[in-house]
Image (cartoon, rainbow, N blue to C red):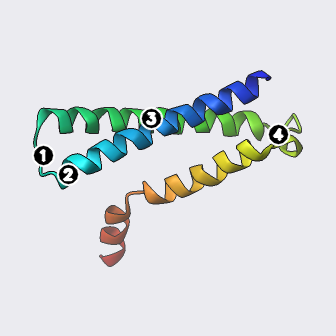
Amino acid sequence: MNNLQKFIYFIIAVKVVYLILELINFCLKLKGRKNTAKYNQIKYWKEKIAFFFKILMSIFLIYVFYPKVKRSDNLDKESKILLYLFGIILIISADWNGFIRDSVK
């Protein structure tokens, strides 16, 4: 296993932690514990991990698509999945309320 594969698996592990925190957060909302200290702490860490994931994916994109080195042919299945999921996450996490609010004006 080379360093790129280790980095990809690390990114996947970070995303799994995020998904677990999102699930806990959702369950707390359903139980009506939205204004508790535990809910706020989970929300805080979820936001930090989401930011960390975006940084890691940005580093991955810079590495893979660096113009002076041709690496894009070496994209394996995990890399393609990560790039696909990153695009979906960026679309979902975009500030749509701000976009719609600015468009209406």
Residue depicted at 15% across the width and 51% down the height: 31
Q: Which mark is residue 10?
A: none
Q: Tell whether 14 sits left or right of 98.
A: right
Residue on which disc 4 sits? 67
Contact check, label 2 and label 1, Cβ < 8 Å: yes
Judged from this view, the residue extending furthest toward the bottom is: 104
Distance, label 3 to label 1, CA atoms, is 21 Å
Query: Which residue is denoted by mark 2 in the rendering?
Result: 29
Position of 64 relative to 1 (above/below): below
State the CA–CA distance, disc 3 to disc 4: 32 Å
Numbered disc in front, either 4 or 1: 1
Q: Earlier in the sequence, mark 2 or mark 4?
A: 2
Q: Compute the Cα span from label 3 to label 2.
A: 18 Å
Please name the amino acid that badge 2 sits on. Answer: Lys
Q: CA distance from mark 2 to mark 4?
A: 45 Å
Q: Quadrant of residue 48?
A: top left
Is the residue under label 1 in contact with that under label 4 (CB below 8 Å)? no
Q: Are marks 3 and 4 in contact (CB under 8 Å)?
A: no
The residue positioned 50% from the left and 53% from the top of the image is: 89
Mark 3 residue type: Val
**C-alpha gap between disc 2 and disc 1:** 6 Å
